[in-house]
Image: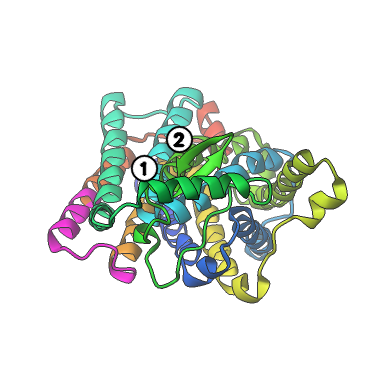
């Protein structure tokens, strides 16, 4: 496949669409509406899953036949936990740093799947490895410089006294049986989530199995797990046959995500309460009056990115297509810098753009080094049915 091949051009255009969708879907999650109701991560994931399901039927308008494969359920098992962990990371560690960790780890996971498992060919392994490290380094740099200023502000905030921290820990222990420690605290809408006083800083703790952990550290860990686990959500598409791959996989994926989401949520409550009725009653509210618009917007943007990534992986391969889609951090970083004004110092903004150039260079190098097999070969057939979601 050459740069003049229509499928090659389509793959890169789809990766661009994925970048815009994935880079923008987190904006409503960080908005005032979500903060005002302390939205549960799995509720926001429900909005994403529902919009993913509803919009997936639009592929019929593109001439795609309605097909289904049970591999979509497997994708859902990867995507639902990964997506919920991503939302938790965004709300507790911040949009920029969390998306940097997610994107970097997804690039690594995608390259491992594409190069070592699916054996997607490259012109030069050395340069391909170099491209992956350029992408990861650039993503890390963008993530770091988009939060460096806010972390400096947070560091100037006086810490609570030891007595206050003990009282807070005691309060967490008293409320442990009445609340789900996975749910994040309400952050005042007037404050950026990253620098809200004692909300996500090291002094704000969560009690888990008798031990306390800062919400920021839990958010960072969730971002890492999102990339490592959720980064494989499109891999099952590699095993889908015939018309159930490519755009034909979109409906299967969205159905699997919707089914897996509430089975997992309900099963968690059922195991915790050991009562089917109580498990249903304690399911968190959707807050439809407040969240329908931001929830639907986040879901629609993510669904747009999802379709783009599926088409990109189909035509470029798992290692290149999904890795290129992670340039979404460029978009989310721009949102953070110019919309939320998380970074205002020109020197730090300049370093962020320098890191962005490193990322773009890595993506271009990886694209140049990719060398899909000739049409009709076994490797080409495998590439044409390999797709994995975010």
* Residue toward you, 377 or 167: 167
Q: In the rendering, at what x and y percent does residue 268 appear?
A: 72, 42
**Is 67 placed left or right of 367 in the picture?**
right
Classify residue 114 as left or right of residue 336. right
Q: Which residues are magenta?
A: 338-356
Residue drawn at x 58%, y 74% as measured from the top left: 293
Answer whether residue 373 is visible to the viewer in this image: no
Q: CA distance from mark 1 to mark 2?
A: 22 Å
Residue found at the far bottom of this picture = 289
The residue that disc 2 covers is 110
Would residue 343 be counted in the magenta stretch? Answer: yes
Q: Is residue 89 left or right of residue 237?
A: left
Q: To which quarter of the image does residue 374 belong?
A: top left
Residue at left offset 63%, top offset 46%: 176
| Residue 204 x %, y % | 43, 50
Q: Position of residue 32 (x, y in %)?
A: 48, 71
Residue depicted at x 60% and y 68%: 296
Q: Residue furthest front?
A: 163
Q: Give the vertical position of 374 relative to 36 (above or below).
A: above
Residue on which disc 1 sits:
2
Who comes first in sequence, dot 1 or dot 2?
A: 1
| SS for callout 2 | helix
Query: Which label was assigned to residue 120?
Result: none
Please name whichever residue, 172 or 185, is drawn nearer the observer in this view of the structure. Answer: 172
- Would you say 278 lies left or right of 232 here? right
Q: Main secondary structure of the magenta part?
A: helix
Q: Position of residue 265 (x, y in %)?
A: 71, 47
Between residue 155 and residue 343, name the one nearer to us.
155
**Cβ atoms under marks 1 and 2 closer than 8 Å:** no
């Amino acid at each position: 496949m050459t740069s003049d091949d229509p499928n090659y051009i389509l793959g890169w255009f789809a990766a661009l669409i994925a970048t815009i969708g994935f880079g923008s879907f987190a904006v409503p999650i960080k908005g005032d509406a979500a903060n005002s109701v302390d939205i549960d991560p799995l509720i926001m994931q429900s909005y994403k899953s529902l919009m993913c399901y509803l919009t997936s039927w639009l592929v019929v308008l593109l001439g795609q036949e309605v097909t289904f494969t049970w591999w979509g359920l497997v994708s859902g098992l990867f995507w639902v936990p990964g997506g919920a962990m991503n939302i938790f990371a965004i709300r507790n560690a911040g949009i920029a740093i969390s998306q940097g960790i997610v994107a970097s780890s997804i690039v690594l996971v995608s390259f491992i799947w594409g190069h070592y498992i699916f054996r997607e060919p490259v012109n030069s392994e050395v340069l391909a490895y170099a491209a992956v490290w350029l992408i990861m380094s650039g993503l890390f740099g963008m993530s770091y410089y988009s939060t460096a200023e806010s972390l400096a502000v947070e560091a100037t905030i006086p810490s609570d006294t030891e007595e206050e921290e003990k009282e807070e820990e005691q309060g967490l222990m008293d409320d442990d049986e009445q609340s789900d420690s996975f749910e994040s605290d309400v952050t005042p809408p007037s404050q950026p989530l990253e620098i809200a006083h004692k909300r996500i800083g090291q002094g704000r703790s969560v009690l888990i199995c008798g031990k306390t952990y800062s919400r920021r550290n839990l958010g960072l860990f969730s971002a890492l797990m999102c990339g490592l686990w959720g980064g494989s959500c499109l891999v099952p598409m590699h095993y889908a046959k015939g018309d159930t791959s490519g755009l034909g996989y979109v409906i299967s994926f969205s159905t699997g995500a919707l089914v897996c989401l509430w089975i997992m949520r309900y099963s968690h409550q059922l195991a915790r309460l050991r009562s089917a009725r109580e498990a249903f009653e304690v399911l968190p509210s959707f807050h439809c009056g407040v969240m329908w618009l931001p929830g639907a917007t986040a879901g629609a943007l993510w669904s747009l990115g999802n379709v783009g990534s599926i088409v990109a992986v189909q035509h470029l391969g798992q290692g290149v297509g999904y890795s290129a889609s992670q340039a979404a951090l460029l978009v989310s970083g721009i949102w953070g810098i110019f919309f939320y004004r998380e970074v205002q110092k020109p020197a730090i903004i300049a370093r962020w753009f320098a890191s962005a150039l490193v990322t773009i260079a890595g993506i271009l190098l990886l694209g140049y080094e990719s060398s899909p097999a000739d049409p009709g070969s076994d490797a080409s057939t495998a590439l044409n049915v390999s797709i994995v979601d975010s």
